[in-house]
Image (spheres, coloured by chain):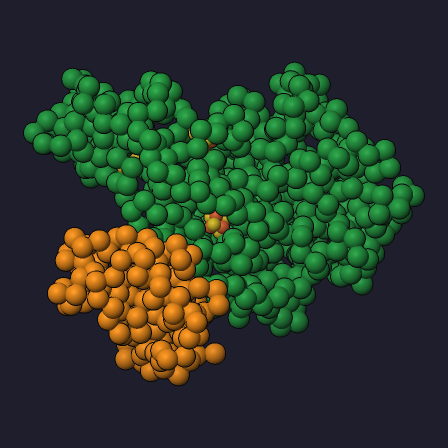
Chain colours: A green, B orange
Amino acid sequence: MITIHVNNRPVEAHPGETVLDALKRAGVKVPTLCHIPGLSPTGACRLCVVEVEGMNGLVPSCAFPVSDGMKVQTHSARAVRARKTIVELLLASHPDDCLYCSRNNQCQLQDLAAELGVRERRYAGERTHHDLDVSDPALIRDPDKCILCGKCVRFCEEIQGVAAIDFIHRGSRTMVTTAFNQGLNVSSCINCGQCITVCPTGALREQSHIKEVTDALRDPDRFVVIQHAPSVSVTLAEEFGMKPGRDVCGALTAALRRLGFDRVFDTAFAADLTIMEEAAELVHRIRNGGRLPMMTSCSPGWIKFVEQFYQDFLPNLSTCKSPQQMLGAVIKSYFAQKEGIEPSRIFSVTVMPCTAKKFEASRPEMSLDGLPTVDAVLTTRELARMIRLRGLDLANLEPESADTPLGERSTAGKLFGVSGGVMEAALRTAHYMLTGQELPELKLQKLRGLKSVKQARVEIAGQEYGVAAVSGLANAAALLDEIRAGRQDLHFIEVMTCPGGCIAGGGQPIGTNLDAVRARMKVLYQIDRDEPIRTSHGNPGIQRLYAEFLGEPLSERSHHLLHTHYTVRDVVP
Amino acid sequence: MVQPDIQSILEQYPQPKRENLIPILQAVQECCGYLSQESMIQIGNRLKLPVSKVYGVATFYNQFRFQPRGKVHCQVCRGTACHVKGSAKVLEALKQTLKIEPGQTTRDGMFSLEVVACIGACGLAPVVAINGEFHAGVTPDSIRKIIKSYAKKGGDNGGVE
Ligand code: SF4
Ligand code: SF4
Ligand code: SF4
Ligand code: FES
């Protein structure tokens, strides 16, 4: 430990860390725009500048290392003036569009302008207008609102290993766009939406489905059902100012009923269904010499990634549809039959932590008899908007429970929200399928926590299996490269596109940070610890569905409704 | 499909190194007259670089064009002498007449425009070279007339490079 002096007070610092990190720990707030915790600094925005005694100019605190005895002034007149000027220059070419902007009240540029007391347009910059890019089924790009901080570019390349976007041109013509400045839909973008959550402004947003959903709710001829993904109930509260780590499942269900949905289902039910099929598939592959390691298929960004960049691994992907699509298919078949409703009358909505789910729902092979099985996908953020619009007070709604059938879940299904959770759930059921007995310890500690690559060896019926859970596609790519190079000890791999899993998905509340992700993770683990039904095969709703309708896992009907195939996808690499 | 000439350029760089990017881009432009999307994809594959990066780097420099040259290729000199003698106005006139920016080609593939560093004919400033032929002492009016005459001839006296 060394000591530095911040605004004339001593502060403990770790040798080698940046000034910004030390400031953060000491509770001194210095604004940043281009900084991404955990990634190397670029020093692009210079908003984080501070004065360091003995240095001539201001230094960017995000890129400057601490040294013993260093004297730092974070809010000297000079530092504050520099920050204000930076913001004023950014605003010079910015559209004054806040009232109509998707990020109104959630925009860092707006916050900074307010914080620094910007009250007039001091510089009038030249404005180059760029058209909105609405080509993609999941994301909209609005380059006019881009302040060129580069966060999306770095996240897309360094964390996701995709690099669909980059800077082009230079000087006043600089912009962030795809290769050849084409629509996002023909680029290699995998729709993960992580760029939206890191973007400080409204330059990136999801394709909203709110209008489709409200239209359906108003249409008396439509029977409108909704399912909510396992991670949504543990993040939604944050949109309403509550602390991260609160599960509002009951209030969420109540809110959805108030919004007018005819049935409220839990996607975690379908996660249990996915586990039944996926575990059966794994057992089948192991017993019949099928392609291993098997890889999970519930994260649509990951699927597109393999279809584009790792086509030799397509046979490794589980053929299981994702829980969203499984439930969609079950709703328009089993549920429709049971309730005597024409499938074409059903409007099937989902609430997802994810923008890529919008793309997934639009994949033609997901349809059933020519009908889409999921008609609209809302992100957590969009649902929050609908709840606010309706004037509902989430904090004070009496909890209600989901509808049956298709509403009961095990805690295993709920664990789908977190990286490692699908693996844990699948192993519980695979063990049962292979041995007829429950795992002696259901909790698999090695697959828990925030690490982006988690590996374990599990013994089932005297045989040892290698498993891994990976999140962030750059990590997944590294693992695939190892396997290409000959690594052979793995039998089953879970991949989630977003770092940490769905709890940190691209459709989750803006402002998600590591502390929030940790709290969300914890509450999912608590649910698993405290509730009685902890395995997917133990879910009575699932048992009933197989008994009444599907027969058994991997039956013909299961194959028809619950499994899919993948295609080699040609994009600009 | 790998175009054979691009292939032979790429073969000169067996090791995929990032610092080879600009020399390769230059060589490809030299041989094809411009950087096609296909060529940038091939370059990206060879250097193991995402195409967004290749395109980002290529657009950073003014020297690269992304459309094939037109039948009539106009190079406006922006050397100091030409600048002093009013080349900016000439360029403006060309942009307006052809409705394209430097680096672009008209839709019909007839005209293309390029701004070049001093072409060493300062005595003739301002100079516009059209298909390699120097036009001296041009003005906005005279360049419009010159363009008109090329348009009439259909560009067939100008060789395609
Ligand atoms: S991006 Fe921010 S500052 Fe710009 S218009 Fe939207 S809310 Fe306002
Ligand atoms: S959605 Fe994901 S893959 Fe697409 S540009 Fe954004 S970060 Fe990259
Ligand atoms: S789109 Fe957003 S994150 Fe990307 S560079 Fe622009 S402002 Fe930054
Ligand atoms: S946050 Fe430090 S330079 Fe941008």
Is A462 in front, or is A424?
A: A424
The reply to whether residue A123 is in sight is yes
Q: Is residue A52 left or right of residue A240?
A: left
- The picture quadrant where one finds residue A370 is bottom right
Q: Is residue A59 left or right of residue A246?
A: left
For image coordinates 63% across by 23% down, the residue present is A388
Where residue B101 sits, quadrant-wise, is: bottom left
**Viewer-side residue, A292 vs A142:** A142
Q: Does residue A217 lie above or below A462 as drawn?
A: above
Q: Residue at x 37, y 56 (%)?
A: B95
Q: Position of residue A431 (x, y in %)?
A: 64, 54
Q: Position of residue A59 (x, y in %)?
A: 18, 33
Say which of A195 and A254 sits in front. A195
Q: Is residue A369 above or below residue A400?
A: below
Q: Is residue A394 above or below residue A309?
A: above
Quarter of the image where the N terminus of chain A is located: top left
Residue B63 quadrant: bottom left
A184, A349: nearer the viewer: A184
Counting labels gives 0
Residue A311 screen position, x and y as percent? 53, 68
Residue at the far left: name it.
A54
- Residue A163 is at least partly visible in this image: no
Residue at 20 percent of width and 37 percent of height:
A64
Could you tell me residue B157's position as x and y percent?
37, 80
The reply, left or right, for residue A339 in relation to residue A539 is right
Q: Residue at x 48, y 29 (%)?
A: A97
Residue A153 to residue A476: above or below:
above
